[in-house]
Image: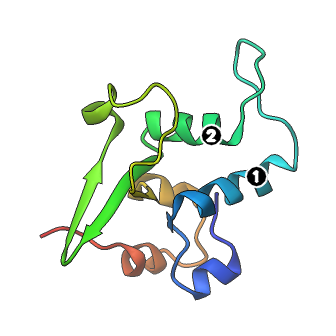
Amino acid sequence: MKPSRKERTAKEGYVYKTDELLGKIKNISQMGDFRFSNGREASKKDLAAFMYKINFLTARKETGERIERKYFEENRYLSRGFADFGFDWEIHPAYRWALQPDDFGDIYRSLKLNE
């Protein structure tokens, strides 16, 4: 999930529209199948739902100058699977460190915080 060089240049590496997120997961999945512990193969939407459930991803919507974020713990009963409620998807800042940025300052420059 590390942003590509192109995504970093466009400053879009950590926020994805639903189709962009599923495309990124598809590209990663080409390296091999992902399976859950029960042996079932994970689809792109299954993987996106899993990343949301572990708070790797947060649902995000910009409304004017305000950013609304939804976390799985707060909205776990909305849907059993992956659903698009008109939100974008953002990699949680806590995980960005693990994605090995070329420059740690990039994390701070790309993050929009609420006041």
Which residue is identified by label 2? 45
**Rendered residue at 47%/79% (across/down):** 106
Q: Is mark 2 on a helix, strand or loop?
A: helix
| Residue 45 versus residue 108 in the image, above or below | above
Which residue is identified by label 1? 26
| Residue 71 versus residue 99 in the image, above or below | above
State the image quarter where residue 45 is shown: top right
* In front of the other: 63 or 24: 63
Instruction: Name the quarter where the C terminus is drawn.
Output: bottom left
From the top left corner, tell me how far across and down residue 7 is, in percent: 62, 78
Q: What residue type is labelled 2?
A: Lys
From the top left corner, tell me how far across and down residue 93 is, in percent: 40, 59
Q: Which residue lies furthest to the left in this view?
A: 115
Q: Is 93 situated left or right of 34 in this image?
A: left
From the top left corner, tell me how far across and down residue 13 is, in percent: 55, 72
**Rendered residue at 18%/78% (across/down):** 65
Q: Is 6 situated left or right of 88 in this image?
A: right
Q: How crowded is mark 1: few (under 14 residues within 10 Å), some or many (20 or more)?
A: some
**Rendered residue at 59%/80% (across/down):** 8
Mark nearer the N terminus (1 vs 2):
1
Q: What residue type is labelled 1?
A: Lys
From the top left corner, tell me how far across and down residue 19 is, in percent: 61, 60
Q: Residue furthest top?
A: 38
Q: Is mark 1 on a helix, strand or loop?
A: helix
Q: Is 27 situated left or right of 97 in this image?
A: right
Instruction: Name the quarter where the N terminus is drawn.
Output: bottom right
